[in-house]
Amino acid sequence: MTRGDPAGAIKLCGHVDDAGNRIACLSGAVQDRFWDTESADEAVLFCQLLDDVDEKSQCYATVLDRAGDLFTVPSDLDAFCLKLEPAYHHWCR
């Protein structure tokens, strides 16, 4: 329902009061949009839009777990990792 609209998905997950369930909502939403390498930029944007450190960290953890499966060539994964916010670059290693 919100593919192509990361901000819309984040807004919908924002209606969840419990922090743990909200993080689960966000993780599911970002994972849903990152099924192939063509949607990598949208997944990264999704994480970049988050303000809460715990939500952002879990978002990047979800994205990097998926990226490891999708980018099978090390140089492609390296290029993808450079798209992440600098604070999360080291998570790729």
Image (cartoon, helix red, strand yellow):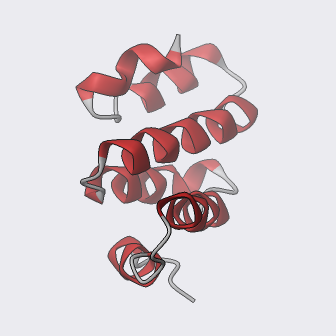
Residue at image coords 67%, 20%: 73
Query: Residue 12: x percent and y percent?
Result: 44, 84
In the picture as drawn, the residue positioned furthest to the top comes out as 93
Query: Residue 75: x percent and y percent?
Result: 54, 16
- The foreground one among 41 and 53 is 53
- The foreground one among 38 and 13 is 13
Query: Residue 69: x percent and y percent?
Result: 75, 34
Among the 4 quarters of the image, the one containing residue 85: top left
Residue at image coords 50%, 68%: 18
In the picture as drawn, the residue positioned furthest to the front comes out as 18
Residue 69, placed above or below residue 48: above
- The foreground one among 80 and 33 is 33
Q: Is residue 61 left or right of residue 89?
A: right
Total marks placed: 0
In the picture as drawn, the residue positioned furthest to the bottom comes out as 1
Residue 3, placed above or below residue 81: below
Residue at image coords 33%, 75%: 7
Q: Is residue 48 left or right of residue 66?
A: left
Residue 59, placed above or below residue 86: below
Q: Is residue 84 left or right of residue 73?
A: left
Residue at image coords 48%, 78%: 16
Query: Residue 35: x percent and y percent?
Result: 70, 57
Q: Dividing the image into 4 quarters, which one contains the N terminus?
A: bottom right
